[in-house]
Amino acid sequence: MREPGDTLALGRSEGRIDAALHEIGDWLMRNQRGIRTAQWGVVVVYLGLLIVPTLLPLPSGAAHIWTNLTLFAQFVFWGLWWPFVLLSTVLVGRMWCGVLCPEGSMTEAVSRHSRGLAIPRWVRWKGWPFVAFAATTIYGQMISVYQYPKPALVILGFSTVAAIATAALWGRNKRVWCRFLCPVSGVFAVLSKLAPVHFRVDSQAWDDWKKPHSRGAAQLVNCAPLVPIRTMKGGSACHMCGRCSGYRGAVTLARRSPSHEIVHVAGAEPRPVETMLILFGLLGVAAAAFHWTSSASFIAIKQTIAEFLVEHGVMWPLEMTAPWFILTNYPDLNDSMSLLDGAVLVGYLVGMAACAGGLVAACAALATRLLGTWSTARFHHLVQSFIPLAACGVFLGLSMTTVSLLRNDGIVFGFVGPLRAALLIGAASWSLWLGWQISALYSRAMIRRVAAMLPLGVAVVTSGAVWATLFWHF
């Protein structure tokens, strides 16, 4: 039993944390000019590391991260930026989007001078977060985006140019690209649900707020990502920029349980696109993208098709290549894909995504039915429980590039293996716990909840095994 003194000390500690978070939120609100200066600093670094390496020769085998700009840029983009932005999203929400993202900064700056056209319906299509992420991931593997500077320029550069173009057409001082079309916006939105901090909105305080009697216009807030602040319940759409902190005395940076949004908010408004993104994007296409380079199945499929083609005298798919911006083509480095390689790669990525995502979907559907009569909303809610496992898997997969680049330069960390195991086991356990908590919202019968956890457990173990085989062979 907790002693009264312990309870009092805990209350004081929580009070200090709440006060500190409140002050951090207000600091962000007061220092928007300084934040914009920092954003443009990031833009300069981003453009430099993106463009300059394409003008340099490809690094030799003797080059190092600290002696070669191309390798340094590769390490910054794919060894630091991508995995650790995902990690930061889990820890502090989408603060990268609101405070440091170069594309967001540029698109908002351009949007101030936009033509102000109405946003077309096709831009507002709800399926873009999944389609854009899946297409970008597959295309990135086709052209080896993690290995060479020109593919990085194509993918990131196209995204940047498209962001600026949307701002010029439809911006109206808003981040239209970030809200609807950014290939990773959906991923950030899903992962930010795990963040232990968010901007909490007190709707009652909002409604009760009275305009001060002092002269001058009332405070106005420009929410660039088009979030309806008053009705915001979770943090998945919020960019954590801090502009609205203290607005109408109702918005405060606050702590919360990392499980709160998934359990108590996500089920209120089912989002099929998030279900697709979790099942077939993060647990499907992303997992396949990390697997195919070392997959015995991929090699076996390619060899079988190649033997069939040779037996029938069809050689051109094995011999013909494509430009580097369609398929990897660096003959001087003995790294080129034939048309057969490219076709098998795309087929493997799509097929593995369908199998991995389909299995988890089937398990979630069975769990949904075991909790009661069929409910599509309940199915979508249960799928949200896989977010910790999906987030951990993608982070570990991306960190493979970090570890590999450092290892090539002689920097080896002995704790990587145990850390990977601990993170994967922890994420799997968290997903199971979320599934258990969500089940309590739909059934009071213990037997139904336990029965529903069986297929959810199969899904978690199977998906966890898919990620585990990246690092260990069973």
Image (tube, grey):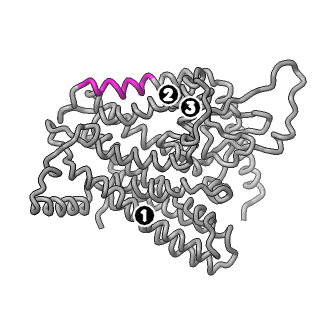
Q: Which residues are magenta?
A: 44-56
Where disc 3 sits, the SS reads helix
Would residue 149 be found to the left or right of residue 258 on screen? left
Total numbered badges shown on the rendered structure: 3
Would residue 156 be found to the left or right of residue 65 on screen? right
Which residue is located at x 23 percent, y 37 percent? 323
Give the residue at the far right of this rendering: 213
In the image, is residue 285 above or below residue 466? Answer: above
Marks 3 and 1, the one that precedes in the sequence: 3
Which amino acid type is marked by label 1? Ser
In the image, is residue 167 above or below residue 250? Answer: above
Front position in the image: 14 or 172: 172
Disc number for residue 28: none
Crowding at dot 2, Cα within 10 Å, few <14 / some 14-19 / many 20+, comes out as many
In the image, is residue 469 above or below residue 222? Answer: below
Disc number for residue 463: 1
Q: Which residue is mark 3?
A: 99
Where disc 2 sits, the SS reads helix
54 part of magenta stretch: yes
Which residue is located at x 36 percent, y 27 percent? 49
Which residue is located at x 21 percent, y 40 percent? 329
Would residue 250 be found to the left or right of residue 222 on screen? right
Where disc 1 sits, the SS reads helix
Which amino acid type is marked by label 3? Val
Label 3, label 1: how many angstroms apart (C-alpha)?
Answer: 33 Å
Q: Main secondary structure of the magenta part?
A: helix
Marks 1 and 2, the one that precedes in the sequence: 2
Whole-percent x, y for residue 36 in the image: 57, 23
Label 3, label 2: how many angstroms apart (C-alpha)?
Answer: 18 Å
Whole-percent x, y for residue 71 in the image: 28, 33
Disc number for residue 164: 2
